[in-house]
Amino acid sequence: MENTTYIALSRLDTQQRTMDVIANNIANANTDGFKAQRVLFSDYLSQQHGVDAPAGGAVLHYTQDRATYLDRKDGSLTQTGNPLDMALSGSGFFTVSTSAGPRLTRSGKFGLMPDGHIADSSGNLLLDRNGSPLQLSPSDTNIRISGNGTISTENGTVGQVGVVTVDDPNQLVPEGGTLYRATAGTTPAAQPKVAQGMVETSNVQPINELTQMIQTQRDFGFVSQFVESENQRQQSAIDKIVQQQG
């Protein structure tokens, strides 16, 4: 197989990866707090040694998948009327406790557990600025959440929601639709922007994603046809060589 085919196959591989990412984005278009993913590609240059003639052609340009990163653009805010729902503006994340350890999320759809702990729909407990679960007493009925995340009731202050920023957002590892694992450090947000009774919707733009998917499918089909044509050309050349030698 010639280098031309290898280069084309590297392009097919990255296009398949693009399709997977786009499909996941579309599947989570209605997932509160979901951040779309983007794929970053670049050329992989393979230097050939000992190439004297013809002039040029000493570098092969392969396509490689360099990284997948989050589109951190804010989603729109939707009012829910639930006093425990919260939406963030800016770069912060809520911190929740999971069976695998603390995780970050932008999905602010929270509710009360039977014991009074505030948790998400999966039962992960919402943590305060000190990393402790937030809990309301049975007598706490008038729930108020200020812009900096401080929760208070008619009985006084309950605590402050733990909103953090990530030192290196490119090191966030998605886990499921709304959770992220921070492989880099996190820092408590100096001025968190919390809106009570609202949730942040997904920042996925379905029309844009579908447009990208159609274009990727077309590119994939074009490169596939090229690979097939190249294969036929090579086979024809081999057949002619065998006939001449015969």
Image (cartoon, grey):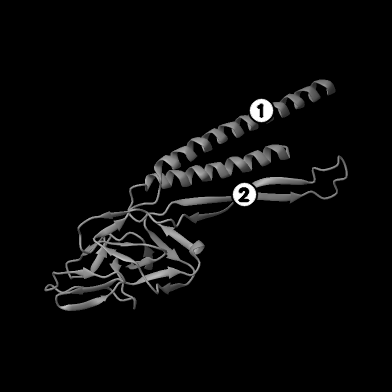
User: Label 1 amino acid?
Assistant: Ser
Give neighbour class at mark 1: few <14, some 14-19, many 20+ (Cα, 10 Å).
few
Specify the farthest residue to the left. Answer: 139
Identify the image quadrant of the C terminus.
top right
Q: Tell me: residue 180, above or below residue 41.
A: below
Comes first in the chain, label 1 or label 2: 2
Instruction: Report whether 42 appears left or right of 190.
Output: right
Q: Is residue 174 in view? A: yes
Tell me, yes or no, whether the two marked residues, 1 and 2, touch with CB atoms within 8 Å. Answer: no
Residue 110: image quadrant is: bottom left
Q: How many labels does the image show?
A: 2
Identify the image quadrant of the N terminus.
top right
Instruction: Report whether 8 appears left or right of 198.
Output: right
Q: Is residue 100 in view? A: no
- In the picture of the structure, the residue carrying the numbered disc 2 is 64
Q: What element carries label 2?
A: strand
Residue 57 in the image: state x and y as whole percent.
Answer: 79, 42
Give neighbour class at mark 2: few <14, some 14-19, many 20+ (Cα, 10 Å).
some
- In the picture of the structure, the residue carrying the numbered disc 1 is 229
Residue 90 in the image: state x and y as whole percent.
Answer: 40, 63
Specify the farthest residue to the right. Answer: 52
Circle nearer the viewer, 1 or 2: 2
Q: Tell me: residue 163, above or below residue 226.
A: below
Instruction: Report whether 26 appears left or right of 62.
Output: left
